[in-house]
Structure formats: structure tokens, C-alpha cells
Image (cartoon, rainbow, N blue to C red):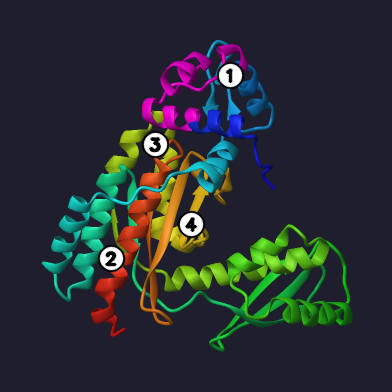
Amino acid sequence: MIRVLTARRAAILRCIVDEYVDSGQPVASRTVVQKYRLPVSPATIRNEMVHLEEEGYVKQPHTSAGRIPSDRGYRYYVEWLMREEMPPEAVRRHLRQMMEGEAHRWGRWAQVTANFLAHYIHGLAIVTAPRTSPARLRWLELVKLQFPRVLLVVILYQADVREMVFPLSGDIGQEELTDLARRLTYQFSGMAAYQIRQALSHMTGTAREVLERAASILDEEDATECRVAAVEGLRELLGHTDTAYHAQALTVLEYVEGKGIARLLPEPSREGVGVRIGSENADEALYPFAVVTATYGVPQGPRGEVAVVAPTRLHYGRAVGMVRYLASLLSHFSQTWLGG
């Protein structure tokens, strides 16, 4: 859990994030004092920056440099310090006019949304097609095979059955497996993959092994259902980074095209918008990036996602505000197309 910072350290962290996002250069204590006019001395700022570094909120690229935000620092900023920016009225009016010009052409709405988001945030923009709610576990069964293999049977809420054979780390009898399956069904029935994963940190042993496999089955089901309707901005994404990051940027495309878009996109959590930062991503190749996502669609009906992938040195307030607005706009225009 992230500890709440003192008012002074929070103010300094905000200055470091804002300045680094704007300039791309490590932020020195002198810059914080001169540009942001904090009512303290450079020595005090330096001391507080050392504390922020010790607590993992900032880091120093090399000895003579200032500080840059860490993933932990960005997370604190997003949760506690960020000022969300609604797109200017002129931009909102322009977007509404473009959407109205494509009346009842949902594919074009998705394309307009992705194209605008990619250029506005300078990242890879993704719009997924509306679909029903994520796959959810109804119950599961475990069948002992020849050691160390077991058969996991997952029954989904839509009555579909999925099976997986995998090795267990311990030799467990059928009676114990049956009891474990019964307990896990009781505890996790009705949950989606992301909800099961949230509980994994509290699980150990065989139960954790089984739940990890069950979550992966649900992920595969979601990936099948989650269809990309529009994607724009690979050039924008590559334009942010040096050559060393190009391979990681292409990994993002692999998720979009085949690995499973559902695993790339975070669940909305910040009042309807999800933000996943750096090492919070599931794949190490995605650590250089942040992903901002919001859902759109008809209430109690099919839902899709609007998302943008960009380097962690991202103007988070602008990205969250734009993604939220585009999702609300798509929801509005989807009412007629989806019959909401």
C-alpha cells in the first residue's frame, strides 16, 4: 500500500512529474525552487528529494543528474496529485461534428476516435468492438491424472466448458482435489479473470496454482470475445522512444493482433478510467509504457473499450480526461447503433 506523503513531499513530487513530463530531462532541486516557487530553500528541496528516492517515488539516472519519477511515483501522482483535464470546448465540438457526420456508421466512429486519440496523446490508440461482459467462472472441477498432471475443468456462466491439463507441484489425491475445487467454486463463482487475480496475492500452494490456470482460461475466452475495431498511432508510439524501445513497442502490437488485447487493457478503476503504469503491466516488455482505458456502450448491454498506450512519461491528466470524454461520446452515439 502506498503511504500518504507529507504535503511538502507531495508538492515536490508533483513538480518533478510535471517538469519531467514537459522536458524529458532529470529535474534538479534548483529547477523546483526557481520554476515552481516553493517557499523553501534548495537545500531543503534536495533533502526531501533524497527521502522521496529512498521511499521509491523518484530515481536518479546517474550521480550528477536530478531526479525522474519511478512507476511508484507516477502511481502516487495519478491517485493523489493529478489534475484531470477535460478537452477544450473547441476540441469537443470538433469531435461531435465528426461523429455526427458519420451517422449510424459505427466502424467509422471507432476509426475517428482512435485516430484523434493517437494524435492528441501521441500514443497507440485502440478501440474494441462492443461485447457482452467478461467471461466469469461458474464452477470448476479437478480430476487427478498420472502424477504430476491434473485436469482442470472450468464451467463458464454462459454454460461453456473449458479444459486444461497442467502439472501440480505436489502429489494430491482425488478426494483432496475435489474438496479444493468445491471450496474454490464457493469462493470465486461469478468472478472474472481480473477479480481472481486480485485475490492471488493472498493465496498460496495448490489453490494458487489452480486459480492462476483458471484465470488464464478466462483470459483466453475474453481475448476471443474482445475484437479490435480500430487501432491507430504506431508511428506516434515509435516517435516517443529511442531505438532501444522499438522492440517493446512492437510487443504492444503483438497484444493487439494476437496475444490477447484483454490482457493489455486495465480494468477501469479511477471513476470509470483504468490506468496501468510501467511494471504494473503483466509482460516485462510492456514496462516502458502506460495504458489508459475507459469503457463505453449501453448500460446493462454490450460494452467496448477506448484505450491509449504511451510511454510512462505521459501527461496523465490530459490522457485520462480525453479517454474519459471519448468513451462518453462513443456511449452517446452507440445508443442508436446498439439500440440502448
Q: In the drawing, does residue 154 fall left or right of residue 86?
A: right
Between residues 197 and 86, which one lies in front from this camera angle? 86
Dot 1 corresponds to which residue? Answer: 45
Magenta residue check for 39:
yes
Dot 2 corresponds to which residue? Answer: 329
Residue appearing at x 76%, y 76% in the figure: 184
Could you tell me if the residues under marks 2 and 3 are in contact, i.e. CB atoms within 8 Å? no
Per the image, label 3 sits on a secondary structure element best described as helix
Q: Position of residue 156 (x, y in %)?
A: 59, 83
Q: Which of marks 2 and 3 is nearer the N terminus?
A: 3
Is residue 285 visible in the rendered image? The answer is no
Q: Which of marks 4 and 3 is nearer the N terminus?
A: 3
Mark 3 is surrounded, within 10 Å at the Cα level, by few (under 14), some (14 to 19) or many (20 or more) other residues, namely: some
What's the magenta region? 15-44
Q: Which amino acid does label 4 sit on?
A: Gly
Which of discs 1 and 4 lies nearer the camera? The answer is 1
Q: In which quarter of the image is the C terminus?
A: bottom left
Dot 4 corresponds to which residue? Answer: 274
Dot 3 corresponds to which residue? Answer: 246
* Mark 4 to mark 3 CA distance (whole Å): 25 Å
Mark 2 is surrounded, within 10 Å at the Cα level, by few (under 14), some (14 to 19) or many (20 or more) other residues, namely: some
Q: Which amino acid does label 3 sit on?
A: His
Q: In this view, does 301 lie above or below 62?
A: below
Q: Which residue lies furthest to the front in this view?
A: 39
Mark 4 is surrounded, within 10 Å at the Cα level, by few (under 14), some (14 to 19) or many (20 or more) other residues, namely: many
Q: Which residue lies furthest to the left in this view?
A: 101
